[in-house]
Structure formats: structure tokens, C-alpha cells
């Protein structure tokens, strides 16, 4: 820290951390001034840079931990073979151990969560922790992260969550928040959001009773006849608003988690299953539940690095890419890229050149040569590429497949999103993940507590 930020900054950082930890202590001890001290703590936290927060989190872990000396005698007693304990004595011993190994940080975090704005503060705090763990591969923060997750599992459960449908009758504030929070298909005006509401366009949001002004996660749905293969069929000039009597498919085309601090808690699965249940009950003609999903990272984090020879993190190797293309398709790509060689390195160079320039989408011969191979490569990426812990490498695929959806090569659509973002993100490819009604049966019991859909404004 000193080398990165200089002596003066380092002293200021130490002072901030010391003040923060003192405020934490006072929040737990001073019943009369909890809220006042919490406001100071929030203000101080918001003034910190991310690297300051990293050091703060490490100090919290180190200074608010059970001393080893308190645990060792008890652990030794439990592990001793020469002590004959009856069941009652054994239970008491284990109870004592559980009490001692419980994180001292939990009571502090619980105190904060009970204050006005406390839960939102912890959400933002965990969001910062996840950012640090992801960007810096910082495992030192895992203990604090797990403490917060344990607390969230208590708070984000029965009785605290409710589902609300966002309609044209919802408040302007609700509609605006949804509009501002959609990162999958961003909107430029409130009119864009209004176009996404109506009889064949639905939006549902999951709220927490302690954070009623912001949705936790929301989903946008198009009710269509058949399964759309392009986003323009839902949002663009090709959009066809289905007649009510023709509807047979619910398409989840935008799912957004507005609270990064809730990543990994499975609330998206709860939302999808609950919305499926409601839509099926509301209209029995709906037979298909599918997504029309982007493939973030397919080009810039996967195929492009492979074509450049940076394939060490992937099961698909650079020399294998050309095998997805027929002789005729390879010949067209080499010709269009004016590449003279014919080996796999020359082909990869040609394909890299073509896909890096979005004008390929206007060349009919190129489009035809690219379609089948690109769909196969995308299928390989979505279905076969895994993280070290065995999960799908693509985050969207991981989300839907872990939630119970299925996918095959037939569900992968070329020229599905030809916007600048769609071409840069995934070479125009989008995916229909298929959700079966069996999903409702498998997890239906676990979500009954969400109760009925709320159809009302909040203010």
C-alpha cells in the first residue's frame, strides 16, 4: 500500500481503517446512538477507494476472529480417545465447540443488517468483496464473504421476499429503475421500457421488504407464437406483437440481477420458477418456456484468443478451429481475407481478420460460409468448455443450466443479434435455453412461500 499510494496516503488509509473499526465497535455497544454511528460508517466507507477497502476487509478478518488459544483445549478434549463421554456430555461438548467457532463477525454484521439501510450497505460491501476476489483472485477475503452469505441466507428467505408484476399502471419510479437497470438490452428512454409492457410483454421483479425501492432481480418476458430466433423479433423493427389467442410461448429475453452482492444465492432460479408457475396458471395455452439469451465473452474472451494462439485455458485448441469448416467454407474465408496460405494458422488468421470487422454481416457469401461452423463452435463453447470446478465456462450458460434448463446445437441461433454489441459480444449468436414444466414440480414446494403475484404500485 505504501509503495502504491505514498506515505501521506498510507497514513490517511490507516486513520480511515482505525475510525471504521471504532465505529463498528460502537454500533454494537451503544444502543442509543447506533443509527447515528452507522451513518458515519456508511459515509466513511463510501469515501474509500477499492484498494483501501481491500485492506479494511483484511483487518476486519484479522481483528474479529476467534483466538486459536480459545479453541485448542476444546478441540484436544474432543479428539482425546481416553475420555468416555455419554451422549449428553458429547452433545454439550459439541454445542460448546459450535458456539466458540461461530464467527465473531456475524454478530456485528447482524447488528448492521437490522439498522435502516443496513442490509443494502452489506449488499454493496459484498459486491466490493466479490470484485476484489474476482479481479485479484484474492482468497484472503473468503472468510468475510462466507460470513455475509450466511447472513443473507437468513435474510433472503421466507417472509422477506415478494414478487411484483411491473405493468403500465406501476409507478414511474418503478418503471424507471427497471429501465436503468437493464444491462442485457439497455434502453435509451422511458418510452422503450413502456414498449416492453402490455398484454404480450410482461415484467416481474423480486423485492425484499427491507429494500422496497429497488428490485433484487427482474425478468422481462415476451409472449409469442413459436420460439423466436432473433432479438429483433421481440425488440426491433421485426417485432410482431402476438394476438392473445395465438400465444403459446413465454420467452425470457432479459434477466438482470440488480444487486451484485447477492451473486450465488440462487434467487434467479426462484424468480424463473415462480414466474413460470404464474404464467402457466394465468394462460394454459403457454406450452413453451424458453430464453433468448446472449453469449457474453464468446468472441473477445474465447474465440478471438484461440485464433490468436492463446488457447491454454480452453479445451478447444487453435489447430482444431479449421476442422469445424468444410473445404468450401475455408476456401471462401481465405479468399475474402486475401490470405494466401492454406494451413490452419493461415486459416485462423483469415477468420480473425473477418470476424474482427463487423462488415462481414453484410456479405451474403460470407454469412453462408460462417453460419454452420460458428453455430458448432458456439455449441462447443456453451456445452463443453468448463471452469476448473466443472461448471460451464460461459456465465449465462452456467446460470441457466444450473437452474434446470437444457440446450443443444439446435437451440443456437446465428444472426440473432446483429447490433454492434451483439457482433462484438458473440458474433451475432444468441441461444434458446429450454425450461421444462418438470422444473416447476421439482422445486415448486421450495417457493410456495413467495405467495401470490402482487399487482400494485409501491408508493
Image: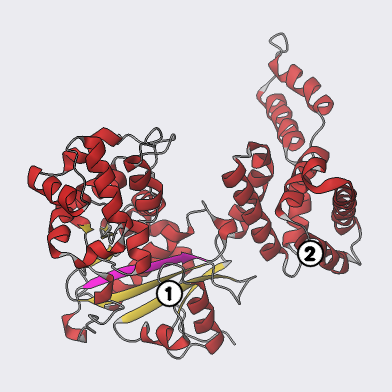
Which residue occupies the foreground of this view, 21 or 333? 333
On the picture, is 186 further left or further right than 288? right
Q: Residue at x 52, y 76 (%)?
A: 180
Element class at badge 2? helix
Residue 80, above or below 296: above
Q: Residue at x 74, y 70 (%)?
A: 116
Question: Residue 308 at x, y = what percent?
Answer: 36, 41
Which residue occupies the foreground of this view, 222 or 26? 222
Residue 369, above or below 220: above
Magenta region, main secondary structure: strand
Residue range highlighted in magenta: 249-257
Which corner quadrant of the image does residue 198 belong to? bottom left
Q: Quick one: label 2, few (<14), some, or many (20+) residues within 10 Å? A: some
Q: Which residue does the numbered mark 2 point to in the structure image?
A: 42
Q: Which residue is drawn at 32% across and 34% down?
A: 315
Q: Which residue does the numbered mark 1 point to in the structure image?
A: 204
Amino acid at each position: 500500500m505504501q509503495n502504491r499510494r505514498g506515505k501521506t496516503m498510507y497514513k490517511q488509509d490507516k486513520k480511515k481503517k482505525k475510525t471504521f473499526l471504532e465505529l463498528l465497535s460502537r454500533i454494537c455497544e451503544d444502543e442509543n446512538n447506533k443509527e447515528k454511528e452507522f451513518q458515519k460508517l456508511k459515509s466513511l466507507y463510501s469515501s474509500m477507494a477499492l484498494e483501501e477497502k481491500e485492506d479494511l476487509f483484511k483487518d476486519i478478518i484479522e481483528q474479529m476472529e476467534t483466538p486459536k488459544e480459545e479453541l485448542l483445549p476444546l478441540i484436544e478434549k474432543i479428539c482425546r480417545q481416553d475420555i468416555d463421554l455419554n451422549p449428553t456430555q458429547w452433545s454439550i461438548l459439541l454445542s460448546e465447540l459450535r458456539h466458540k467457532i461461530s464467527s465473531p463477525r456475524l454478530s456485528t454484521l447482524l447488528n448492521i443488517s437490522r439498522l435502516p439501510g443496513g442490509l443494502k450497505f452489506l449488499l454493496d460491501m459484498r459486491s466490493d468483496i466479490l470484485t476484489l476476489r474476482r479481479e485479484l483472485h484474492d482468497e484472503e477475503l473468503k472468510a468475510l464473504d462466507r460470513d455475509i452469505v450466511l447472513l443473507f441466507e437468513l435474510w433472503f428467505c421466507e417472509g422477506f421476499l415478494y414478487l411484483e408484476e411491473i405493468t403500465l399502471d406501476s409507478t414511474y419510479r418503478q418503471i424507471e429503475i427497471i429501465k436503468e437497470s437493464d444491462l442485457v438490452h439497455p434502453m435509451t428512454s422511458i418510452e422503450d421500457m413502456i414498449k416492453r409492457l402490455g398484454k404480450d410483454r410482461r415484467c416481474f421483479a423480486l423485492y425484499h421488504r427491507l429494500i422496497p425501492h429497488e428490485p433484487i432481480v427482474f425478468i422481462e418476458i415476451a409472449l409469442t407464437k413459436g420460439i423466436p430466433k432473433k432479438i429483433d423479433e421481440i425488440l426491433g423493427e421485426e417485432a410482431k406483437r402476438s394476438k392473445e389467442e395465438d400465444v403459446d410461448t413465454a420467452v425470457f429475453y432479459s434477466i438482470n440481477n440488480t444487486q451484485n452482492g447477492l451473486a450465488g444465492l440462487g434467487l434467479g432460479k426462484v424468480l424463473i420458477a415462480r414466474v413460470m408457475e404464474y404464467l402457466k396458471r394465468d394462460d394454459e395455452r403457454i406450452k413453451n418456456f424458453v430464453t433468448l439469451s446472449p453469449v457474453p465473452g464468446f468472441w473477445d474472451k474465447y474465440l478471438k484468443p484461440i485464433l490468436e494462439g492463446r488457447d491454454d485455458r480452453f479445451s478447444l485448441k487453435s489447430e482444431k478451429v479449421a476442422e469445424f469448416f468444410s473445404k468450401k467454407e475455408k476456401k471462401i474465408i481465405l479468399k475474402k481475407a486475401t490470405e494466401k496460405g492454406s494451413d490452419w494458422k493461415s486459416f485462423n488468421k483469415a477468420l480473425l481478420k473477418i470476424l474482427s470487422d463487423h462488415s462481414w454481416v453484410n456479405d451474403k457469401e460470407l454469412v453462408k460460409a460462417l453460419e454452420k461452423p460458428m453455430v458448432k463452435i458456439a455449441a462447443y463453447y456453451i456445452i463443453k468448455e468448463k471452469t476448473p470446478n466443472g461448471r460451464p465456462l460461459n456465465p449465462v450458460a452456467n446460470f441457466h443450466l444450473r437452474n434446470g434448463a437444457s440446450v443443444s446445437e439446435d437451440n443456437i441461433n446465428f444472426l440473432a443479434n446483429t447490433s454492434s454489441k451483439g457482433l462484438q459480444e458473440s458474433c451475432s449468436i444468441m441461444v434458446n435455453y429450454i425450461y421444462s414444466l418438470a422444473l416447476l414440480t421439482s422445486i415448486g414446494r421450495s417457493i410456495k412461500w413467495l405467495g401470490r403475484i402482487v399487482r400494485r404500485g409501491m408508493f
